[in-house]
Image (cartoon, rainbow, N blue to C red):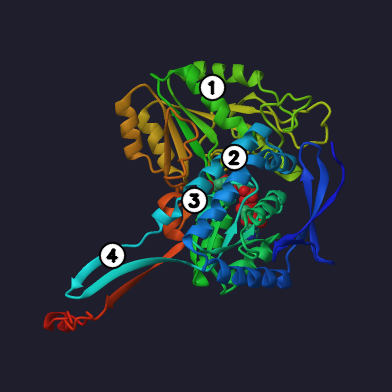
């Protein structure tokens, strides 16, 4: 394992910059539990330089023809496709997820890049000839200017890619503030954009903490904010950005339930619960964290899930001798302690710990931030450990007696990000999709992240604002419309405008 500590800086004006004397934060390799990087945290001067450079980039980029913009996007897509294993290795080294999962997140981000290459079609305006005699009305879609993206640690490549391909395709310049826990993926992406021919300043990376975030929220040169992270911060971002007159979309946390009806294929449900509960060590906003087992299936389902957990391998996400584990470590030591505390709370509140990951140790990685897969039965729904997001490899089972009890429980929660139903009854599935107050639904599909040409976003405390990420919502968010009413005099002297059009104010 590499023990060298790298300096990690901002990407401003097309170069990586590590300002002398900057405040810094340690970046870890979570499998080793060791510091791997020292990150420069932005101060007011860095924020100002980043935004000024983005403004200059915007002035150049927004004047590029559609064809030239499209050529850069295609080039970025080709380079990303050719080199994505480099990016996956960076993600695994700082986040900890297994390499194949890092490749998976890049693939889902690449989908949005591919959608964005079709922007000329998606950004076309509309034209009405002769709205009044001799008068045409049409609409143009124009970029917003410099847009801010603030992203969480759990998808250092995919979440920024939910936004920046569309923002850039639409002619905006982007300032990305990645998570300070895994900041290097953003720098790799910045270099790739440069190689693809994007003018300097159009994609800027501002590293930092709350100071950098507040700088973006308050600066009048930033036109919009796209945020993904935990709910309390999402709410703060939404309110503060709106107060400063910005367009804002702020995606928050989750507590996703999987409903298993008695007629479901229990082997399929158990496979998918394990996959969606423990993949990426549960650090996914679309992870399944609660299984609602409609009796009498609970005993049998829990037995099947426990059997599968016994086969899970936990270890360094990079693999050992070419063999990849199923699950890597958590992001930080503090986060591991917080996850353990939630399991303690559940136990204290009367839940049964069926599989306990609190003392899991990975041989050869004794200092890593590992937490074993944990299965909890008879989870009391009044417990804080049920109501709050844990964001770790902890699956809670709540036994319910009916479909309706399950739906009522889901709808009583504060989050509304994702949910899934496992059943062989189409009528129940249809009723579920109609009644459940959640933004993304899976039917016999555990992690229903919509494809790029639909849009991603939850309801309630999982999304503040009215614009989801990517798809049609993405193009709406990153453009503003202008309506033009125009009259050109006929060269033959027929003036076209009639008395009635003049009376209409034309
Ligand atoms: P986080 O809210 O701690 O951090 C997200 C971003 O906000 C980071 O860039 C961070 O630097 C910044 N930030 C943190 N505290 C701040 C503060 N006080 N003021 C200003 N900025 C601040 O989230 P995280 O721990 O990085 O990510 C995990 C969370 O993100 C989970 O809650 C997860 O559900 C959520 N998430 C949601 C989605 C979704 O699509 N809804 C997707 C991925 C992750």
Is residue 167 in sight in this rendering?
A: no
Q: Nearer the viewer, mark 3 or mark 2?
A: 3
Whether 405 is drawn above or below 182: the answer is above
- Asked if residue 339 is positioned above or below residue 259 in the image, the reply reads below
Residue sitting at x 49%, y 72%: 245
Q: Secondary structure at mark 1?
A: helix
Give SS at disc 4: strand
Spatial CA distance of label 4 from label 1 is 52 Å
Q: Position of residue 195 (x, y in %)?
A: 67, 54
Which mark's residue is nearer the viewer, 1 or 3? 3
Q: Residues within 10 Å of mark 3 (few under 14, many from 20)?
A: many
Tell which tag, 2 or 4, sits nearer the viewer.
4
Q: Which residue is mark 2?
A: 105
The mark nearer the N terminus, 4 or 3, is 3
Q: Nearer the viewer, mark 1 or mark 2?
A: 2
**Can you tell me whether the CB of the residue at mark 4 lies under 8 Å from the nearest atom of ligand 1?**
no
- Residue depicted at 65% across the width and 34% down the height: 281
Tell me which corner region of the image, top left, top right, bottom left or bottom right, holds residue 204: bottom right
Q: Position of residue 367 (x, y in %)?
A: 83, 36
225 or 134, which lies in front?
Answer: 134
- Residue where numbered disc 1 is placed: 271
Horizontal side, residue 26 vs residue 274: left or right: right
Label 1 within 8 A of ligand 1 by Cβ: no
Q: Are marks 1 and 2 in contact (CB under 8 Å)?
A: no
Mark 4 burial class by Cα count in 10 Å: few <14, some 14-19, many 20+: some
Q: CA distance from mark 1 to mark 3?
A: 36 Å
**Can you tell which of label 4 and label 1 is closer to the viewer?**
4
| Of pointers 4 and 1, the one earlier in the residue sequence | 4
Q: Residue at x 61, y 34 (%)?
A: 346
At numbered mark 2, what does the secondary structure look like: helix, strand or loop? helix
266 or 180: which is nearer to us? 180
Q: Disc 4 versus disc 3: distance between alpha carbons?
A: 23 Å
């Amino acid at each position: 394992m590499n023990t060298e500590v790298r300096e990690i800086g901002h990407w401003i004006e097309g170069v990586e910059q590590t300002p002398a004397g900057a405040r810094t934060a340690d970046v870890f390799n979570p499998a080793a539990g060791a510091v791997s990087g020292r990150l420069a945290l932005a101060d007011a001067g860095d924020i100002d330089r980043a935004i000024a450079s983005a403004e200059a980039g915007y002035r150049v980029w927004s004047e590029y023809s559609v064809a030239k913009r499209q050529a850069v996007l295609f080039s970025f897509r080709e380079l990303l496709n050719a080199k994505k294993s480099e990016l996956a290795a960076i993600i695994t080294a700082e986040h900890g997820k297994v390499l194949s999962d890092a490749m998976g997140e890049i693939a889902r981000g690449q989908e949005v890049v591919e959608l964005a290459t079709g922007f000329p079609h998606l950004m076309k305006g509309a034209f009405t000839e002769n709205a009044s005699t001799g008068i045409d009305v049409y609409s143009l879609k124009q970029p917003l200017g410099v847009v801010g993206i603030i992203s969480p640690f759990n998808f250092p490549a995919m979440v920024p890619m939910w936004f920046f391909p569309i923002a850039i395709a639409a002619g905006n310049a982007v300032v990305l503030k990645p998570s300070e826990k895994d900041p290097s993926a953003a720098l790799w992406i910045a270099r790739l954009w440069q190689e693809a021919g994007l003018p300097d300043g159009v994609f800027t990376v501002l590293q930092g903490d709350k100071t950098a975030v507040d700088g973006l929220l308050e600066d009048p040169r930033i036109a919009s904010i796209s945020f993904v992270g935990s709910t309390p911060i999402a709410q703060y971002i939404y309110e503060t950005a709106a107060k400063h007159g910005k367009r804002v979309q702020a995606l928050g946390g989750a507590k996703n339930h999987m409903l298993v009806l008695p007629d479901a294929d229990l082997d399929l449900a158990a496979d998918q619960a394990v996959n969606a509960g423990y993949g990426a060590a549960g650090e996914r906003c679309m992870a399944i964290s609660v299984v609602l087992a409609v009796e009498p299936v609970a005993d049998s389902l829990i037995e099947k899930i426990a059997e599968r957990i016994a086969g899970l391998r936990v270890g360094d996400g990079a693999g050992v001798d070419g063999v990849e584990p199923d699950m890597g470590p958590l992001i930080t030591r503090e986060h591991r302690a917080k996850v353990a505390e939630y399991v303690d709370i559940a136990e204290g509140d009367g839940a049964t710990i069926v599989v306990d990951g609190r003392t899991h140790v990975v041989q050869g990685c004794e200092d890593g931030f590992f937490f074993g897969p944990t299965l909890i039965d008879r989870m009391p729904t009044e417990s804080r450990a049920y109501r709050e997001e844990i964001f770790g490899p902890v699956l809670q089972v709540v036994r319910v007696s009916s479909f309706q009890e399950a739906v009522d429980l889901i709808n009583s929660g504060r989050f509304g990000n994702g949910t899934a139903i496992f059943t062989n009854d189409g009528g129940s599935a249809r009723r579920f999709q109609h009644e459940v107050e959640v933004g993304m639904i899976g039917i016999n599909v555990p992690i229903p992240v919509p494809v790029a040409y639909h849009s991603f976003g939850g309801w309630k405390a999982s999304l503040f604002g009215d614009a989801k990420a990517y798809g049609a919502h993405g193009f709406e968010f990153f453009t503003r419309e202008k309506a033009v009413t125009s009259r050109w005099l006929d060269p033959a002297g027929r003036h076209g405008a009639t008395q009635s059009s003049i009376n209409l104010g034309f």
